[in-house]
Image (spheres, rainbow, N blue to C red):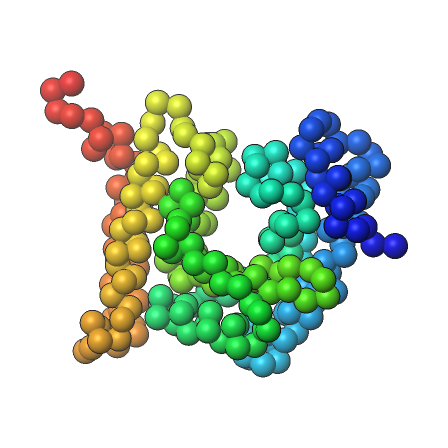
Amino acid sequence: MPLSAREVNRLGERIKAGPLTEDDRRLLLEFRASFLPAYQEVIAKIRDALEVDPTGRPEKTPESIIAKLRRGDVKNLASMQDIAGCRIVVDSRYLQDQWVEAFRGLFEKAKPIDRRQDPSHGYRAVHVIVRTRGRQIEVQVRTSLQDRWANVVERFTETMGVDFKHGEQAPDDPWLKWLELGAECIDRVERMDNPELVQGLDNHELDRYRRGQFSALMLLVPYIRELSQVPGE
Protein backbone atom coordinates (compact mmCIF):
# COMPACT_ATOMS: atom_id res chain seq x y z
CA MET A 1 0.00 0.00 0.00
CA PRO A 2 1.40 3.45 -0.94
CA LEU A 3 2.52 5.74 1.87
CA SER A 4 0.05 8.46 2.82
CA ALA A 5 1.14 12.11 2.68
CA ARG A 6 1.37 12.13 6.47
CA GLU A 7 3.60 9.04 6.47
CA VAL A 8 5.79 10.57 3.76
CA ASN A 9 6.25 13.76 5.75
CA ARG A 10 7.03 11.82 8.92
CA LEU A 11 9.68 9.96 6.93
CA GLY A 12 11.08 13.29 5.78
CA GLU A 13 11.26 14.59 9.34
CA ARG A 14 13.17 11.50 10.45
CA ILE A 15 15.58 11.92 7.54
CA LYS A 16 16.20 15.56 8.49
CA ALA A 17 16.66 14.74 12.15
CA GLY A 18 19.42 12.18 11.99
CA PRO A 19 21.16 9.24 10.32
CA LEU A 20 19.11 7.27 7.82
CA THR A 21 18.08 3.84 9.10
CA GLU A 22 17.78 0.86 6.79
CA ASP A 23 13.99 0.82 7.24
CA ASP A 24 13.71 4.50 6.33
CA ARG A 25 15.98 4.07 3.34
CA ARG A 26 13.70 1.28 2.11
CA LEU A 27 10.65 3.53 2.57
CA LEU A 28 12.39 6.38 0.73
CA LEU A 29 13.18 4.10 -2.21
CA GLU A 30 9.56 2.89 -2.29
CA PHE A 31 8.28 6.47 -2.27
CA ARG A 32 10.70 7.44 -5.04
CA ALA A 33 9.69 4.43 -7.17
CA SER A 34 6.01 5.46 -6.88
CA PHE A 35 6.73 8.38 -9.24
CA LEU A 36 7.61 6.12 -12.19
CA PRO A 37 4.08 5.68 -13.66
CA ALA A 38 3.45 9.44 -13.56
CA TYR A 39 6.86 10.12 -15.08
CA GLN A 40 6.25 7.65 -17.91
CA GLU A 41 2.85 9.20 -18.62
CA VAL A 42 4.32 12.72 -18.86
CA ILE A 43 7.18 11.61 -21.13
CA ALA A 44 4.80 9.73 -23.44
CA LYS A 45 2.41 12.68 -23.65
CA ILE A 46 5.22 15.10 -24.54
CA ARG A 47 6.55 12.76 -27.22
CA ASP A 48 3.16 12.06 -28.76
CA ALA A 49 1.65 15.55 -28.65
CA LEU A 50 4.69 17.78 -29.14
CA GLU A 51 6.98 15.43 -31.08
CA VAL A 52 10.02 16.13 -28.95
CA ASP A 53 12.15 13.65 -27.04
CA PRO A 54 12.99 15.10 -23.61
CA THR A 55 15.98 14.07 -21.56
CA GLY A 56 14.55 12.14 -18.65
CA ARG A 57 15.49 11.59 -15.04
CA PRO A 58 12.91 9.17 -13.67
CA GLU A 59 14.38 9.08 -10.17
CA LYS A 60 16.28 11.67 -8.13
CA THR A 61 19.05 9.92 -6.20
CA PRO A 62 18.33 9.21 -2.52
CA GLU A 63 21.42 11.25 -1.60
CA SER A 64 20.06 14.29 -3.47
CA ILE A 65 16.67 13.95 -1.78
CA ILE A 66 18.28 13.68 1.65
CA ALA A 67 20.58 16.67 1.01
CA LYS A 68 17.69 18.81 -0.19
CA LEU A 69 15.64 18.00 2.91
CA ARG A 70 18.54 18.72 5.26
CA ARG A 71 19.33 22.04 3.55
CA GLY A 72 15.75 23.09 4.16
CA ASP A 73 15.09 23.73 0.44
CA VAL A 74 11.58 22.31 0.79
CA LYS A 75 9.04 22.43 3.59
CA ASN A 76 8.49 18.67 3.64
CA LEU A 77 9.14 15.53 1.61
CA ALA A 78 5.62 15.29 0.15
CA SER A 79 5.95 18.75 -1.41
CA MET A 80 9.25 18.06 -3.18
CA GLN A 81 8.62 18.82 -6.86
CA ASP A 82 11.67 17.35 -8.59
CA ILE A 83 11.86 13.75 -7.41
CA ALA A 84 11.17 12.76 -11.03
CA GLY A 85 11.43 14.96 -14.09
CA CYS A 86 12.65 15.63 -17.58
CA ARG A 87 14.28 18.43 -19.53
CA ILE A 88 14.23 19.96 -22.94
CA VAL A 89 16.84 22.40 -24.27
CA VAL A 90 15.87 24.99 -26.87
CA ASP A 91 17.84 27.49 -28.91
CA SER A 92 16.52 30.76 -27.51
CA ARG A 93 14.59 32.47 -24.76
CA TYR A 94 11.82 33.23 -27.24
CA LEU A 95 11.42 29.49 -27.95
CA GLN A 96 11.64 28.80 -24.24
CA ASP A 97 8.54 30.93 -23.68
CA GLN A 98 6.76 29.15 -26.53
CA TRP A 99 7.52 25.70 -25.10
CA VAL A 100 6.34 26.73 -21.66
CA GLU A 101 3.03 27.82 -23.16
CA ALA A 102 2.83 24.51 -25.04
CA PHE A 103 3.24 22.58 -21.78
CA ARG A 104 0.59 24.71 -20.11
CA GLY A 105 -1.79 23.79 -22.92
CA LEU A 106 -0.87 20.12 -22.80
CA PHE A 107 -1.15 19.54 -19.06
CA GLU A 108 -4.14 20.66 -17.01
CA LYS A 109 -3.19 22.98 -14.13
CA ALA A 110 0.50 22.98 -15.11
CA LYS A 111 2.40 25.39 -12.86
CA PRO A 112 5.35 27.30 -14.41
CA ILE A 113 8.11 28.48 -12.07
CA ASP A 114 10.19 31.15 -13.83
CA ARG A 115 13.69 31.00 -12.39
CA ARG A 116 14.85 33.58 -14.89
CA GLN A 117 13.05 36.17 -12.76
CA ASP A 118 14.17 34.64 -9.47
CA PRO A 119 17.52 32.89 -10.14
CA SER A 120 19.14 30.60 -7.59
CA HIS A 121 22.85 31.46 -7.31
CA GLY A 122 22.87 32.26 -11.02
CA TYR A 123 20.79 29.29 -12.15
CA ARG A 124 18.07 30.25 -14.63
CA ALA A 125 15.45 28.14 -16.39
CA VAL A 126 11.70 27.69 -16.43
CA HIS A 127 10.36 24.69 -14.55
CA VAL A 128 6.84 23.48 -15.29
CA ILE A 129 5.34 21.39 -12.50
CA VAL A 130 2.87 18.80 -13.81
CA ARG A 131 0.62 16.82 -11.47
CA THR A 132 -0.71 13.46 -12.57
CA ARG A 133 -1.52 10.17 -10.85
CA GLY A 134 -1.17 11.97 -7.53
CA ARG A 135 2.49 12.84 -8.18
CA GLN A 136 4.36 15.99 -9.22
CA ILE A 137 6.71 15.77 -12.21
CA GLU A 138 9.11 18.60 -13.02
CA VAL A 139 9.63 19.55 -16.67
CA GLN A 140 12.69 21.79 -17.05
CA VAL A 141 12.88 24.09 -20.06
CA ARG A 142 16.36 25.56 -20.57
CA THR A 143 17.96 27.55 -23.33
CA SER A 144 21.21 26.17 -24.73
CA LEU A 145 23.22 28.80 -22.84
CA GLN A 146 21.38 28.25 -19.58
CA ASP A 147 22.10 24.55 -20.00
CA ARG A 148 25.80 25.12 -20.71
CA TRP A 149 26.13 27.38 -17.69
CA ALA A 150 24.48 24.75 -15.47
CA ASN A 151 26.81 22.07 -16.84
CA VAL A 152 29.84 24.28 -16.14
CA VAL A 153 28.67 24.70 -12.53
CA GLU A 154 28.26 20.93 -12.22
CA ARG A 155 31.81 20.37 -13.50
CA PHE A 156 33.22 23.00 -11.14
CA THR A 157 31.39 21.35 -8.26
CA GLU A 158 32.84 17.96 -9.14
CA THR A 159 36.42 19.13 -9.67
CA MET A 160 36.62 21.60 -6.76
CA GLY A 161 34.37 19.83 -4.27
CA VAL A 162 32.38 23.03 -3.68
CA ASP A 163 28.58 23.02 -4.04
CA PHE A 164 28.26 26.21 -6.10
CA LYS A 165 24.79 25.15 -7.23
CA HIS A 166 23.46 25.70 -3.73
CA GLY A 167 25.48 28.81 -2.89
CA GLU A 168 28.56 27.32 -1.25
CA GLN A 169 31.61 29.60 -1.42
CA ALA A 170 35.09 28.48 -2.48
CA PRO A 171 37.62 29.27 0.29
CA ASP A 172 39.51 32.52 -0.43
CA ASP A 173 38.27 32.72 -4.04
CA PRO A 174 35.28 34.57 -5.54
CA TRP A 175 34.19 31.71 -7.82
CA LEU A 176 30.52 31.86 -6.89
CA LYS A 177 30.43 35.62 -7.45
CA TRP A 178 31.91 35.24 -10.91
CA LEU A 179 29.68 32.34 -11.87
CA GLU A 180 26.67 34.43 -10.88
CA LEU A 181 28.06 37.33 -12.91
CA GLY A 182 28.47 34.99 -15.88
CA ALA A 183 24.85 33.90 -15.58
CA GLU A 184 23.78 37.55 -15.49
CA CYS A 185 25.76 38.26 -18.67
CA ILE A 186 24.14 35.29 -20.40
CA ASP A 187 20.71 36.51 -19.34
CA ARG A 188 21.40 39.94 -20.84
CA VAL A 189 22.50 38.33 -24.11
CA GLU A 190 19.38 36.17 -24.23
CA ARG A 191 17.08 39.14 -23.75
CA MET A 192 17.87 39.91 -27.40
CA ASP A 193 15.59 37.02 -28.30
CA ASN A 194 12.66 39.35 -28.86
CA PRO A 195 12.13 38.92 -32.63
CA GLU A 196 11.63 42.66 -33.07
CA LEU A 197 15.13 43.31 -31.70
CA VAL A 198 16.96 40.81 -33.88
CA GLN A 199 15.48 41.49 -37.29
CA GLY A 200 18.05 40.78 -39.96
CA LEU A 201 19.83 38.05 -37.96
CA ASP A 202 19.09 34.49 -38.97
CA ASN A 203 19.09 31.69 -36.38
CA HIS A 204 22.65 30.67 -37.26
CA GLU A 205 23.98 34.19 -36.78
CA LEU A 206 22.13 34.63 -33.49
CA ASP A 207 23.41 31.30 -32.19
CA ARG A 208 26.99 32.21 -33.16
CA TYR A 209 26.66 35.48 -31.27
CA ARG A 210 25.47 33.72 -28.11
CA ARG A 211 28.14 31.04 -28.37
CA GLY A 212 30.82 33.70 -28.79
CA GLN A 213 29.63 35.61 -25.73
CA PHE A 214 29.56 32.47 -23.60
CA SER A 215 32.98 31.24 -24.83
CA ALA A 216 34.60 34.61 -24.17
CA LEU A 217 33.18 34.63 -20.66
CA MET A 218 34.44 31.13 -19.88
CA LEU A 219 37.92 31.99 -21.19
CA LEU A 220 38.18 34.53 -18.38
CA VAL A 221 37.67 31.92 -15.68
CA PRO A 222 41.38 30.98 -15.25
CA TYR A 223 42.20 34.67 -14.75
CA ILE A 224 39.36 35.56 -12.40
CA ARG A 225 41.58 35.83 -9.34
CA GLU A 226 44.04 38.14 -11.07
CA LEU A 227 41.26 40.28 -12.56
CA SER A 228 39.63 40.69 -9.17
CA GLN A 229 42.77 42.04 -7.51
CA VAL A 230 43.33 45.76 -7.28
CA PRO A 231 46.68 46.85 -8.81
CA GLY A 232 49.21 47.77 -6.18
CA GLU A 233 47.79 45.57 -3.42
Residue at 84 percent across and 36 percent down: it is: 23
Is residue 84 positioned above or below 165 on the image? Answer: below
Q: Residue furthest right?
A: 1
Closest to the observer: 109 or 133?
Answer: 109
Specify whether 221 is left or right of 148: left
Image quarter of residue 172: top left
Q: Position of residue 209 (x, y in %)?
A: 25, 63
Please count the marks in the image.
Answer: 0
Residue 56 shows in the view: no
Q: Residue furthest front?
A: 6
Specify whether 196 is left or right of 83: left
Q: Position of residue 81 (x, y in %)?
A: 60, 53
- Location of the N terminus (image quadrant): bottom right
Q: Position of residue 120 (x, y in %)?
A: 42, 45
Residue at 29 percent across and 61 percent down: it is: 190
- Location of the C terminus (image quadrant): top left
Residue at 38 percent across and 56 percent down: it is: 116
Residue 141 shows in the view: yes
Closest to the observer: 19 or 111?
Answer: 111
Q: Position of residue 15 (x, y in %)?
A: 71, 34
Image quarter of residue 171: top left
Residue at 64 percent across and 56 percent down: it is: 84
Q: Residue furthest top?
A: 233
